[in-house]
Image (cartoon, grey):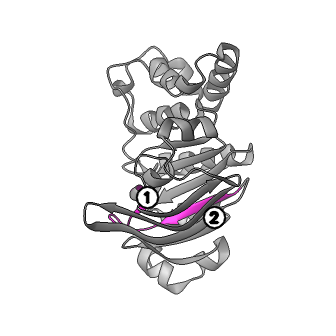
């Protein structure tokens, strides 16, 4: 589905991504592990068109989408849920959700059906749909952010640090929801520092350090890898 070949990205003279080659197959849930500043968000922003790669190619379903605008990538089915949620706190939950459907705005019937699906996925948002998004708890705000991304009807959902700043119980619920989204047919690429929780729901994982992919493997190989355990899980 998603294929990156020797992708590089720069901030001025600084090379933030170096020769990144990776793939995500249809129906997979793939985790990208890495510490703060390792390049996870830069990689996501490059895949979603917010940063143009300085080298390499990105393809989606066999079509070259390198350098495509973010709106074009959303229409192609690539939707990012950014780190930090990036909600409009003064706007209602419902209005925040509807922003995610903007590229499909002419298809009113489909938007209505997608909204019903999102509110079924997150029933608490149906109760609070008229409240200001900023008045919700951290976990509920993350639900709004994921729900807004789902309103874009993604084929490939990019989730950037969804567990950041959430209580352990909420994190557990969040990962169960993400697993459910994947099982219902959405391909997921998940960037996480919470390696143990992420690997438990993943099919495969990559590790990024200093803008380079340094390791990859299936869930069991990663959970059993001593270096991974020491760096991201704890002995």
* In this rendering, position of residue 228 left or right of residue 35: right
Q: Residues within 10 Å of mark 2 (few under 14, many from 20)?
A: some
Q: Residues within 10 Å of mark 1 (few under 14, many from 20)?
A: many
The residues colored magenta run 28-41
Residue 95 position, x and y percent, is 46, 18
> Label 1, label 2: how many angstroms apart (C-alpha)?
16 Å
Residue 215 position, x and y percent, is 53, 78
What residue is disc 2 on?
23
> Which mark sits nearer the N-terminus, 1 or 2?
2
Query: Which element carries disc 2, helix, strand or loop?
Result: strand
Q: Residue at x 47, y 47 (%)?
A: 49
Q: Quadrant of the N terminus?
A: bottom right
Residue 124 position, x and y percent, is 54, 26
Camera sees residue 235: no
Q: Residue at x 61, y 44 (%)?
A: 177
Q: Nearer the viewer, residue 52 or 232?
A: 52
Mark seen at residue 53: 1
Inspect the magenta stretch and tell me whether residue 30 lies in it. Answer: yes
Inspect the magenta stretch and tell me whether residue 38 lies in it. Answer: yes
Q: Nearer the viewer, residue 133 or 205?
A: 205
Query: Which element carries disc 1, helix, strand or loop?
Result: loop
Q: Residue at x 54, y 46 (%)?
A: 174
Tally of numbered tags:
2
Residue 197 position, x and y percent, is 54, 61
Q: Nearer the viewer, residue 9 or 96?
A: 9
Mark seen at residue 32: none
Q: Nearer the viewer, mark 1 or mark 2?
A: 1
Camera sees residue 30: yes
């Amino acid at each position: 589905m998603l294929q990156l070949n020797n992708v590089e990205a720069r901030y001025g003279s600084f090379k933030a991504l170096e020769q990144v080659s990776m793939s995500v197959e249809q129906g997979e849930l793939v985790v990208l592990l890495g510490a703060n500043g390792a390049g996870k968000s830069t990689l996501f922003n490059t895949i979603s068109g917010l940063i143009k790669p300085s080298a390499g190619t990105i393809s989606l379903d066999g079509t070259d989408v390198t350098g495509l605008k973010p709106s074009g990538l959303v229409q192609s089915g690539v939707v990012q849920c950014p780190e930090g949620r990036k909600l409009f706190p003064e706007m209602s939950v419902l209005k925040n959700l509807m922003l995610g459907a903007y590229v499909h705005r002419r298809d009113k019937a489909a938007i209505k059906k997608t909204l019903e699906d999102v509110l079924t996925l997150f029933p608490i948002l149906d109760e609070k749909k008229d409240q200001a998004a900023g008045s919700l708890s951290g976990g509920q705000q993350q639900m709004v952010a994921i729900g807004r991304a789902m309103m874009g009807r993604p084929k490939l959902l990019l989730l950037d640090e969804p567990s950041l700043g959430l209580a352990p119980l909420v994190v557990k619920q969040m990962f169960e929801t993400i697993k459910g989204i994947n099982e219902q047919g959405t391909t997921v690429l998940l960037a996480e520092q919470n390696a143990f929780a992420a690997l438990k729901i993943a099919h495969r994982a990559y590790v990024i350090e200093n803008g380079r992919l340094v390791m990859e493997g299936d869930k069991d190989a990663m959970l059993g890898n001593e270096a991974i355990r020491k760096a991201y899980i704890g002995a």
